[in-house]
Amino acid sequence: MKNKGIWFAVGCYLIWGVFPLYWKMLESVPAVQIVAHRQAWSFVFLVFVLLIGGHFARFSHDPNLRRMINRRTLLIYFASGVLLTVNWLIYIYGVNAGFVVETSLGYYINPLVSVLFGVIFFRERLPVSRWIPIGLAAAGVIYLTVSYGQPPWLALALAFSFGLYGLVKKLSPLGSLYGLTLETAAMFPLALGYLLLVEAQGAGQFVHAGLGPTALMILCGVVTAVPLLLFSAAARSIPLSMIGVLQYIAPTIQFLCGIYIFHEAFTQSRLVGFSIIWVALILFSVSGLFERKKALQAAAAAD
């Protein structure tokens, strides 16, 4: 089961890693419309998954599950849906505007932001060995800010929006499939309303952009939901420390796409800033593995 979980995680991160190639094929479509289609078709696909999996019947026969659907739950998933939409919008805009390398930086920084949020909002305690890489990553961002002449806004916006999304999801009571369906359901009326509005204004790209882009817009639902479901399956079967190491597959592939496929500029100052952050991530991952090993040894000794 553990090996299967590793493959689920690798598959998930490989798909996320090549996402820039997918969104670049929709370069002619405005980012807001792509995100609206992504939300709408994700909801349609997830409802289909629930139907063929018999989940609606389970829901109708499970009073505990029905009790979870209350005002607080709906507010949580509406908030997470908004944050996920914002993250998608920033990411797709960044990719199609030629900032793939900077978007990859956002997902390198994100794990450290998530840890920082855990400390601030959930009073999680970190050993000194894990504060050092966080400080080092901050130094890398400051270096990039000085060398750019401005902060790497896209990267920071991606890291913090996804970090906030994870923070809200920590409060969510439902499983991943039901939760993701509820998130997309909360955004579906807004997405559909926006798409109908731009269509009425003559600015809609669906069908009008051609057969290829239209098919890609419809498939947004599948390419969005499948890696999220793979991630959920992986998270249930392998340790979080392993997921923490594997998660760098996606931004590394995105980074390589930006450099070698889209030929984005990567100056020496950028190399220095990225290198500082990469070293911070290596230290952070190694520290996490040692902490987990110590915890397992302590538990074994206690037994």
Image: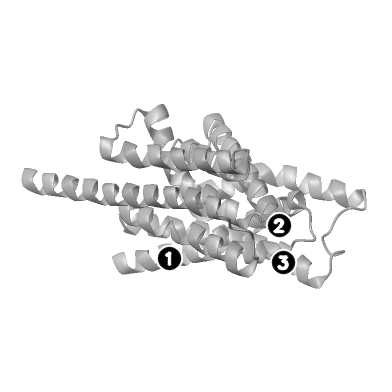
* Element type where label 2 sits in the image: helix
What residue is drawn where x is 22% and y is 49%? 290
- Pick the residue in front: 273 or 116: 273
Q: Residues within 10 Å of mark 2 (few under 14, many from 20)?
A: many
Specify the farthest residue to the bottom: 211
The picture quadrant where one finds residue 157 is top right
- What residue sits right under mark 3 in the picture? 25
Question: Residue type at mark 2?
Answer: Asn
Gap between marks 3 and 1 measured at Cα = 24 Å
The picture quadrant where one finds residue 138 is top left
Above or below residue 122? Residue 237 is below
* Element type where label 3 sits in the image: loop
Question: Residue type at mark 1?
Answer: Val
Dot 1 and dot 2 residues touching (CB under 8 Å) = no
What numbered label is drawn on residue 142? Answer: none
The quarter of the image holding the N terminus is bottom left
Q: Residues within 10 Å of mark 3 (few under 14, many from 20)?
A: few
- Pick the residue in front: 37 or 287: 287
Circle nearer the N terminus (1, 2): 1
Gap between marks 1 and 2 measured at Cα = 25 Å
Give how far across and how far down residue 75 sits, in percent: 57, 32
**Across the whole image, how many numbered discs are drawn on residues?**
3
- What residue sits right under mark 1 in the picture? 10
What residue is drawn where x is 84% and y is 49%? 196
Residue 56 placement, left or right of 282: right
Circle nearer the N terminus (3, 1): 1
Q: Residues within 10 Å of mark 1 (few under 14, many from 20)?
A: many
Give how far across and how far down residue 182 sits, in percent: 58, 45
- What residue sits right under mark 2 in the picture? 96
Between label 1 and label 2, give the one nearer the viewer.
Answer: 2
